[in-house]
Amino acid sequence: MKKLEFIIINLLFLLHCFLVMLLIFEKGVSIPFWLQPLGRMHPLVLHFPITLIVLLVIFSFCKKQIEQETYKMINHFLLLFTAFTTVVTAIMGLFLSMEGDTTNLMALHKWIGVAISFLVYTLTFIKKEKVFKTLLYVGFIGVIFVGHYGASLTHGTNFITEPLTKAEAVEINENTPIFQGFVKPILDSKCLSCHNSEKRKGELDMSSFEKMVQGGKGGNLWVSGSPEKSTLLKRVHLPMQHKKHMPPQGKKQLTNPEIQLINAWIKQSADKKLALVQLAEQDTLAQMVSKLLAIKNKKRIPAFSFNFANIETIAALQNPFRSVIQKSTTSPAIEVVINGRETYKPEFLLDLSAIENQVTSLNLSFLPIDKSSIEFVSSLSNLNNLLLNFTDVTTDDLTNLKACLNLKTLALSGTKVDIEIKSLLKQLPKLETLYLWNTSLSSQDIDNIKSELPNIHFETGFKSDGKKLQLTPPVLTSKNTIISKDDFIELGHKMPGVDIRYTTDGTTPTSTSKLFEAPIQIDLKNNKPIKSIAYKKDWLPSKLKAIQFIDKGYTPEQFKVAYEGENNEFIGLASKILIDHNKAGNGVASSTPYWTTFNSNNPLNALAYFGETPPSVNHIIFNYGVHRKAEIEPLASIEVWVGQDRNNLILLKQIKKTARKLELNKDNKGIEDKRPRRIKIDVPKSTTFKYYKIIATPHKNSKIYIDQLYFY
């Protein structure tokens, strides 16, 4: 026993000498690769000294209950073993710390750990009981602190308090910045433990937005508008085994919906203040955040057990005649719509075999599908909604649909089904809604089916009193009126079976004009409005619908404003709004995310940079509006400066407007002229400029509401 004690005491002396040497030459020491695994075992062995020190403290309270000689012997050997594990743990910790960057938190953890090691070693020589107990209790307190700092290094500085902060009810709504409400929680959960103000792995601190923008050794965390250039997403998409994959293997990984959300946020602008209310309804990021917001507000979201489809697969299936949309980042369900009777090909449907498990909604209305098409549809085992309106399918063609056991909605308006459809319907256990407008089924037939299938809701259409009703005008289903030359335009109608006749030359369409059957492209050089009228048998034609499209033109590489606009009455964020291609309605400003506000003290001062090889901009369009209660024309002047050097620009054109009094409507509750206000400035065709500066100044005591700037 004495020999073992002698060996341990001498070994402790040598190990502490080695520890001192490491501390002295720490900056000049490089740990060889074969010793690095020993350092990485630090988290495994640190529990031994913690447990043994706690055990020594507990044992000190049992002194009177144990025979003294026995107590001294057990306490002495327990102390030697504690000192040995403590110094070994400290040495391993030093090895591990030399692999990465030293932070304040790591320094605290290291020096307290080293101090505990020497303190416990000192206890092996202390004979006086009071001094022994005092130092032991000090060591116990040190263990608490070193453990806390160690947990903060591993899990983040808020690891202990995180459950308490999560429990606090924080309201997240459509005005909450998307970064604060949805992106930051993901990064905090998956990244903050290694990249915080105390543990800056790779010199990257992700404790705040401002620190994230600074980036780290790997470069910028993200590049606004370019997810493919953003280090964050590059690292996330690396193979799991790659040494630069983030989070590292063994850590909690980002999910596919989380990656898609961050990707969409960066692509949109990576703006810290960007909120849901500022996005267009059809925007991808808006749809993602809307679904997440619904979940946070505990709204009912359908749950599906099948896996998500590959993002690249979904993108590859998209074309002008087939829309393939994953409606939510939190759900793998996919909705598919195929358009164009004349352009339809069977492969438009058959290609969906790549996502057959994810398709929950399929719209094949107006298409020339047949029995073989329905046979493929029956393989979509998770199909919930199927629209076959105004196709040529018969009851016999639909027989295979009995395999769609999850079908909830079936639309058969305008088809050739008969009373025998009842047999199929009985084999669809989850069917809730059936559409049967304009079929050969009589009222008696439908009543017969209803009596045998009381749990199904039947939609059989409107029964008129013999008088013809007027159709509503067609609608623009492709949403945006600001387009590029490669964009397709789609028209639609809320009622099935409607013919949409249209013209693109500015003339009024008739019942013999071109029929809208597939997405079309607009000639933006001879930009005439698309005019359309809806026709349907036994209905009066709709009123004329005229839609004017605007050339999206060129988007600057950089766009900066000296003042972002007021945030109290309207949205602000001029650097985004003025070039986001989302146009407001008329020229009367309202509380929507399409306007930004300036006054005479803070005029618009915007600088657009188009790169080293700028495009040939021929026109600049300045769109603005006025408040509905404005009394005078708000715009005093607009100036356009151009040049190749931002510090040496020349004045291209200046337009001044008088503060004329605006005419109010009859009830004096608003301005009479609600037309969009726009100023067109021509740029010499023979010259290209890298920089364009636009200065718009309102009249004194007036506000100007600016919508868009177009360069084309």
Image: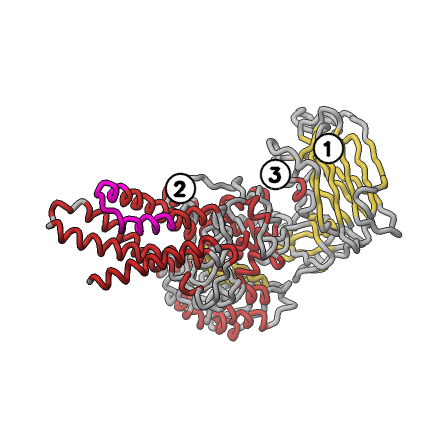
Give the mark nearest the N terminus, 1 or 2. 2
Which disc number belongs to residue 592?
A: 3
Q: Is residue 387 above or below residue 628?
A: below
Q: Nearer the viewer, residue 35 or 515?
A: 35
Residue 20 coordinates in the image, percent (x, y):
42, 54
Taking the image as shown, residue 77 lies to the left or right of residue 677, namely: left
Residue 199 coordinates in the image, percent (x, y):
48, 50
Q: Which of the two marks, 1 or 2, is nearer to us in this view?
A: 2
Is residue 230 visible in this depiction of the protein? yes
In the picture, which quadrant includes the N terminus? bottom left
Most common SS among magenta residues: helix
Residue 486 coordinates in the image, percent (x, y):
71, 59
Q: Which of the two marks, 3 or 1, is nearer to us in this view?
A: 1
Q: Which residues are the magenta region?
A: 113-134
Which disc number belongs to residue 165?
A: 2
The residue furthest bottom is: 372
Which disc number belongs to residue 603?
A: 1
Q: Residues within 10 Å of mark 1 (few under 14, many from 20)?
A: many
